[in-house]
Image (tube, helix red, strand yellow):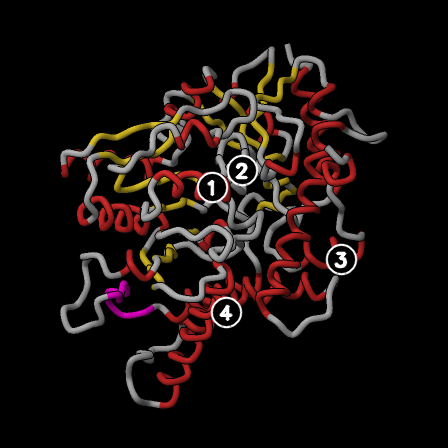
């Protein structure tokens, strides 16, 4: 492939410094009051200051946005603007927003509505899924007496091949539920091809995508990838915890689901809205658009958002390239003796910035502890964990150190991590 594309493109130094200043605690642990590098953004995420600050400001207000006083009406306007921003993230022209306490709860409800109400004898998913998607499919398919078909993973790319999915879909498939990108390997599935090829087999196939892992790293576009359900977690997208966001197509939104009887058939909001959570999402979109404005002149919010996410993706790819191949400052992971990069696929344009790393001299749990001693936060993914077992077993891997940086990191963070990795590799 084109090596320039594979190497990505770093933000210039000034912009990179500006971006780092817009996030809380990038370089420090505020509890222990010491320096650290937080490379566990696939499990949590560094927080955008404006997103958290806006949440606090809004959450202090006692007003109910469904009431008639001035501030209540203002809160409703904030929520409505944020709803449009959610549509900007998804590039969704129609359909309904779904909100819940978590993205896992949202995808459970979306999958339930389809499996329970759409005719068909089988449901297709993959071995790569997060338990929220996989378990919801198994649970509701079992309830409805439908067969569950599971597509195999690719042990080279760390993803799932298009044909592994298409060969399981037939005219009796009521739902295809699959993950956009792996939270272990970082592999990004070929979503456009999967949707296109599966709907050749069944044109009215219902499809739900778990995009929690991919949303902070790349562009979503329901105009190009029309699906019936999709979700993301704001807290993994520089925002706050306690909120899960989904979106359903017009036809899926009208399926039977929990709602107040008097409300519209496609209404998925249940209970009082949370303006502070919505406002936090608007700050995330503002931020991504701000990055986009550094590279293009436009008044179109979606256009700026897409440019911003593309630039985030390119910067992270450049950091990933440096982490893998090193520089004159430090050896890359591919070159450090005693270190293995699992599921290391050469085409970085098909990967989000996640590394699955192992050591010859110590296990993954011990390695994570050694990283923390040296000021790096990573996370062990082990086959004994309910969140990892199915995926790791499909790759025939017992455990890995998952390393997941974010675009607010810079080359200095990568080089420091690589030097620490070399140090750990030499432990006896």
Q: Residue at x 48, y 63 (%)?
A: 281
Does 48 appear above or below 393? below
CA–CA distance in space, label 3 to label 2: 27 Å
Quarter holding residue 135:
top left
Check disc 2 and report the residue beneath it.
Answer: 188
Q: Earlier in the sequence, mark 2 or mark 4?
A: 4
Indicate the position of residue 82 as horizontal and vertical percent values. 45, 70
Check disc 1 and report the residue beneath it.
Answer: 180
Q: Which mark is residue 54?
A: 4
Q: Residue at x 74, y 19 (%)?
A: 335
Q: Is residue 43 left or right of residue 73?
A: right
CA–CA distance in space, label 2 to label 4: 32 Å
**Disc 4, SS:** helix
Q: Nearer the viewer, mark 1 or mark 3?
A: 1
Q: Residue at x 38, y 28 (%)?
A: 167
CA–CA distance in space, label 3 to label 4: 23 Å
Q: Is residue 356 left or right of residue 105?
A: right
CA–CA distance in space, label 1 to label 3: 29 Å
Do the numbered discs 2 and 1 sit on residues whose CB atoms are within 8 Å?
Answer: yes
Q: Earlier in the sequence, mark 2 or mark 1?
A: 1
CA–CA distance in space, label 2 to label 1: 6 Å
Indicate the position of residue 6 as horizontal and vertical percent values. 72, 36
Q: Please tell me whether residue 391 belongs to the stretch shown in magenta.
A: no
Task: Characterize the local packing of mark 4: few (<14), some (14-19) or many (20 or more) Cα atoms within 10 angstroms.
Answer: some
Does 75 appear above or below 238? below
| Magenta-colored segment: predominant secondary structure | loop
Task: Characterize the local packing of mark 3: few (<14), some (14-19) or many (20 or more) Cα atoms within 10 angstroms.
Answer: some
Q: Which residues are magenta?
A: 266-273
Q: Which mark is residue 247?
A: none
């Amino acid at each position: 492939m084109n090596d320039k594309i594979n190497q990505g493109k770093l933000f210039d130094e000034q912009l990179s410094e500006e971006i780092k200043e817009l996030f809380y605690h990038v370089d420090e642990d505020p509890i222990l009051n010491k320096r650290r590098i937080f490379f566990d953004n696939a499990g949590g995420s560094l927080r955008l200051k404006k997103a958290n600050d806006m949440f606090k400001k809004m959450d202090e207000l006692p007003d109910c946005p469904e009431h008639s006083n001035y501030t209540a009406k203002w809160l409703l306007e904030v929520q409505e603007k944020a709803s449009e921003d959610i549509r900007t993230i998804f590039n969704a022209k129609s359909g309904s927003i779904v909100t819940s306490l978590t993205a896992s709860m949202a995808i459970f409800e979306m999958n339930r509505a389809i499996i329970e109400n759409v005719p068909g004898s089988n449901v297709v998913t993959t071995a790569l899924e997060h338990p929220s998607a996989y378990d919801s499919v198994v649970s509701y398919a079992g309830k409805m007496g439908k067969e569950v078909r599971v597509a195999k993973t690719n042990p080279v790319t760390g993803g799932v091949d298009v044909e592994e999915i298409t060969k399981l879909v037939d005219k009796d498939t009521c739902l295809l539920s699959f993950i956009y990108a792996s939270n272990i390997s970082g592999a990004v599935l070929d979503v456009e091809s999967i949707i296109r090829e599966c709907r050749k087999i069944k044109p009215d196939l219902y499809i739900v995508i778990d995009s929690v892992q991919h949303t902070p790293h790349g562009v979503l576009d329901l105009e190009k990838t029309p699906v019936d359900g999709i979700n993301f977690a704001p807290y993994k997208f520089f925002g706050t915890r306690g909120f899960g966001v989904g979106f359903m197509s017009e036809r899926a939104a009208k399926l039977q689901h929990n709602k107040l009887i008097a409300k519209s058939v496609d209404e998925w909001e249940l209970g009082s809205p949370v303006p502070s959570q919505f406002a936090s999402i608007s700050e995330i979109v503002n931020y991504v658009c701000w990055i986009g404005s550094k590279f293009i002149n436009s008044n179109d919010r979606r256009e700026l958002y897409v440019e911003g996410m593309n630039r985030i993706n390119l910067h992270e790819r450049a950091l990933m390239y440096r982490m893998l191949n090193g520089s004159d400052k430090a050896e890359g992971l591919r070159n450090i003796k005693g270190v293995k990069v699992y599921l290391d696929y050469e085409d970085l344009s098909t990967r989000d910035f996640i590394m699955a790393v192992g050591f010859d001299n110590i296990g993954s749990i011990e390695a994570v502890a050694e990283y923390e001693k040296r000021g790096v936060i990573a996370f062990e993914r082990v086959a004994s964990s309910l969140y990892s077992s199915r995926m790791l077993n499909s790759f025939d891997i017992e455990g890995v150190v998952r390393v997941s940086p974010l675009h607010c990191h810079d080359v200095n963070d990568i080089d420091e991590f690589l030097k620490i990795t070399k140090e750990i590799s030499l432990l006896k």
